[in-house]
Every structure is written in structure tokens, then in C-alpha cells.
Amino acid sequence: MDPQGELYTALYGDLKRLAHGRLRQLPGGGLNTTALVHESFLRLDGRELHFSHEGQFLAYAAKVMRSVLVDLAREQGAERRGSGLAPLTLATEALLHIAQEPPLL
């Protein structure tokens, strides 16, 4: 196991408390505490980072957790604004044609 994986294992309880605090600031975020800890681990996994003490690691993990939550909020905001929907172009020529037709009685 790499050094970060060992730190995650050793500090898992601290990371969960940290994640719980972050999620309390953002209710209804769509993630639970465990999911936030695991997502932050996936973002850190494989990077060559060196920490002189556990406090540095926890501070960096807190920043990663914040970036996970920011990305999630942006994604949810994009969904509310119609992300993935095809843009609709209105043809005004069709509206002019309809306006010129006599009404049906």
C-alpha cells in the first residue's frame, strides 16, 4: 500500500469526522459521509504527494473534500439549468404564417 493509502487507513475515523462536518455545512448535497471520504480517496490515489505530518494530510484531504462537494454542486446546478437537453431554436417564419391564417369558425 502506498503512503497515502496507509494514512487514509490510519486516519479513517478522523476523515469521516471531517467529512461529516463538511456535509453538515451543505445539507442535501447528495453524498453521505462514507461516500465523501471514498471519493476524496479516489481523487488522491496515485498522486505523488508527501506530507511531513498527519495534520498536513488532513488539511489537504479537507481541501479535496471541498472540491468534491463544489463539483457536485456545479453538476446539480447544471442539471437544474437543463444540462443535456437539446437547444430549441424557434423559427419566427412559422409564427408569421400562423398569424396570417384566417381563424376557423
Image (cartoon, helix red, strand yellow):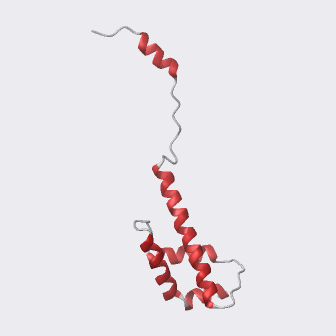
Q: Residue 33 at what x, y percent from top left?
A: 45, 77
Residue at image position (56%, 89%) is 9
Residue at image position (64%, 77%) is 45
Q: Which residue lies furthest to the left in this view?
A: 105
Q: Residue 87 at what x, y percent from top left?
A: 53, 37
Does residue 49 sit above or below 103 in this rendering? below
Q: Residue furthest front?
A: 25
Question: In the shown orientation, is residue 39 left or right of residue 29?
Answer: right
Quarter holding the C terminus is top left
Does residue 61 sit above or below 91 in this rendering? below
Question: In the shown orientation, is residue 45 left or right of residue 78?
Answer: right
User: How many discs appear?
Assistant: 0
Q: Residue 1 at what x, y percent from top left?
A: 64, 88
Quadrant of the rendered image containing residue 5: bottom right
Quadrant of the rendered image containing residue 98: top left
Residue at image position (50%, 61%) is 73
Does residue 10 sit above or below 37 in this rendering? below
Question: In the shown orientation, is residue 7 left or right of residue 52?
Answer: left
Q: Residue 94 at what x, y percent from top left?
A: 48, 19
Residue at image position (48%, 46%) is 82
